[in-house]
Amino acid sequence: MSIRAATLADTDEITLLCVATLDDDPNWRYRFPKAREYRDDHIKYSRTRFATYLENAENGAYAVMVVEAPSKEDATVKKIIAVSMWVLPGHHLPKADAPVQVKKPPDHAERRDANQARLAEFVRELTQARNSWFHDVYGDQQLGLILLGTHPDYRRLGAAAMLLKWGREKAEAEQVPVTLFASPMGYPLYAKAGFTEVNKAHVQVEGDDVFVELPAMVWVP
């Protein structure tokens, strides 16, 4: 396995990887409960999201790192098996005069795979939580992990640990903390790596019995 920075040319491969790896993530399923029913919508709008993150990486505001390994179908062909997406230090807080403006993925009210009420509440709650627990404490000097995922066919090979190690080494070199909201699957990896849970975000639309909780975690070098 090898690790490298992703490019815009990887957009389609990363999109399909993320759709596969996030399919069993409760936080993703909460927002996109009809992802399987409306797969075309899900791939289309997910691609827009991840393309935006890759554009931010090209501009120097984000980092998108991937792990490649020989394909199980053809060992002579390398494929992306895991991905991590990071907001780099200095790009967390909006600045009108910043030389690099961080792009946000557009909202698509017409997408059929999403529960729009849950999606809006998820964004509202996590924005508030991120401001209170990360930005108010560390300001712009933090390395924020947005997403870390491995394709289901290539899990338990150490790919996610490689990507997390990359982030911790970068944070240590720059002497900034790593901040993230953990999924249930990712929590044990982060805890083992020395991350500390500082709080927990509770996302629930009023009148909806379904909710998700996301531990806010920090690693300080």
Image (cartoon, rainbow, N blue to C red):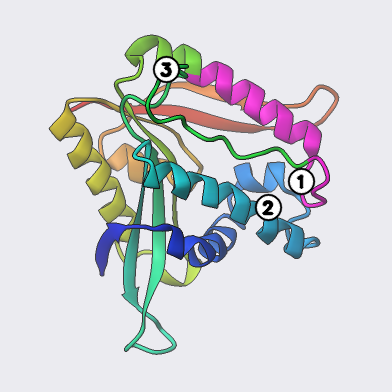
User: Left of 81 or right of it: where is 219?
Assistant: left
Split into 4 quadrants, where in the image is the N terminus?
Answer: bottom left
Provide the residue designation for mark 2: 45
Which element type, helix, strand or loop, lies under badge 3?
A: loop
Q: Main secondary structure of the magenta part?
A: helix
Lower position in the chain sequence, tag 1 or tag 2: 2
Q: Secondary structure at mark 2?
A: helix
Sequence-wise, the earlier of marks 3 and 1 is: 3
Q: Is residue 169 magenta?
A: no
Q: Give the magenta part as a residue range.
A: 109-130
Asked if residue 119 lies in the magenta stretch, the reply is: yes
Mark 1 residue type: Ala
Q: Residues within 10 Å of mark 2 (few under 14, many from 20)?
A: some
Q: Earlier in the sequence, mark 2 or mark 3?
A: 2
Pinpoint residue 57: horizontal percent, then vertical percent: 39, 45
Specify the amino acid type for callout 2: Tyr
| Rendered location of residue 170, percent (x, y) | 20, 39
Q: Which mark is residue 114?
A: 1
Residue highlighted by disc 3: 97
| Secondary element type, mark 1 | loop
Front: mark 1 or 2: 2
Q: Name the residue located 75 percent from the left edge and 33 percent from the top edge.
A: 118
**Which numbered tag is attached to residue 96?**
none
Q: Residue at x 45, y 49 (%)?
A: 54
Q: Are marks 1 and 2 in contact (CB under 8 Å)?
A: yes
Measure how far apart labels 2 and 3 are at the Cα level: 30 Å
The span from disc 1 to disc 2 (Cα, nearest Å) is 10 Å
